[in-house]
Amino acid sequence: MKMKRIAAITMVRNGDFFLSKWVQYYGSLLGEENLYVFFDGTDQNVPGFAAGCNTELVPRVAGNVREADKGRIAFISARAAELFRRYDMVIGTDVDEFLIVDPALGVPLPEFLSGLDAGNRNSFSGLGCDVVQNLRCEKQLDRTRGLLEQRSYVYLSTRYTKASVLCKPVPWGSGFHRTKQGNYHIVKDLYLFHFGCADVPETEQKMLDEDLSARGWGRHLNKRMNLIRRVSALPVRDWDKWTGKARVLQTVFRPPYMWNKPAMLGLEIVLKLPERFAEVV
């Protein structure tokens, strides 16, 4: 099998903790020279741990949360299109998102993606897993330890079944949630883990951030807190059974307002991660 040339791209503002995890994770798999990190605002600093990556400070994207999301994804999509001059695939995620192959396969992410046949597809998606702090049994994150050593519960979320892997230079929709050309394809044994709800103190700190509040983040952060409370009260279901079911549901059902986004028919499914994931991130 011929290995594909794969890059990863992201944009960040005031997010060094998750960016450090992002660089460590994707750098170990793809090589830091194949990571492209754009800092939203020339008032930002490039941290030392990102020295081996391709980094750039860019003028801050203006507007409220919705407008800024559109501006950021337009910028990232344009840069990703340029990368296709040298790469076969481009992974695009936020800094708190990690595209993970099931460790049971024993196959690294680059080899796994290289084995996929893109055909006429524009993108590939992992099944969306929102890693959420379970208030019944999980404490505040210790930032010196691995994330999945400390977090074992995920909420199956259509929001994070994203078009994370581009196979062609097509534009992403806001937040990498879809591509503006073509359908999505959820790949078996591939998952997108999102950690935005993994730590209550982190979320509470963001809720006090005046800049985020002024840009309209309050509603979104309140939804995160509500999700943490719900997940902590919901029953826990079987990983293998429900990841398979969710993949089928999200492939077959679509919201009427967005045909190329997945749906879960309103089901709220919480799963406990198998032990094999504990050392991945």
Image (cartoon, helix red, strand yellow):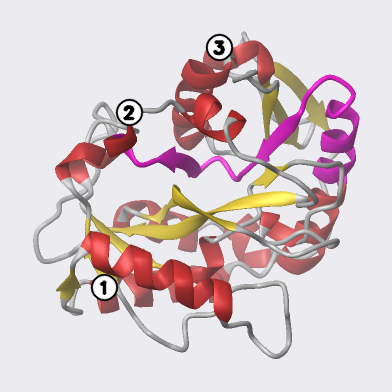
Give whichever of discs 2 and 3 has the lower sequence position. 3
Amino acid type, callout 2:
Gly
Position of residue 197 measured from the top left corner of the image (x, y, whole percent): 38, 59
* Residue at horizontal 19 percent and vertical 66 percent from the top: 238
* Residue at horizontal 36 percent and vertical 74 percent from the top: 227
Magenta residues (range): 75-103
Position of residue 92 measured from the top left corner of the image (x, y, whole percent): 67, 41
Which one is in front, 213 or 111? 111
Task: Assess disc 1: are there few (<14), some (14-19) or many (≥20) residues with their C-alpha within 10 Å of its C-alpha.
Answer: many
Q: Which residue is mark 3?
A: 48
Cα gap from disc 1 to disc 3, whole angstroms: 36 Å
Which one is in front, 223 or 28? 28
Give whichever of discs 1 and 3 has the lower sequence position. 3
Q: Nearer the viewer, mark 2 or mark 1?
A: 2
SS for dot 1: helix
Cα gap from disc 2 to disc 1, whole angstroms: 30 Å
Query: Which quadrant is home to the N terminus?
Result: top right
SS for dot 3: helix
Amino acid type, callout 1:
Val
Q: Are marks 2 and 1 in contact (CB under 8 Å)?
A: no
Looking at the image, residue 273 sits to the left or right of residue 190; the answer is left
Q: Which residue is mark 2?
A: 106
Tell me which corner region of the image, top left, top right, bottom left or bottom right, holds residue 68: bottom right
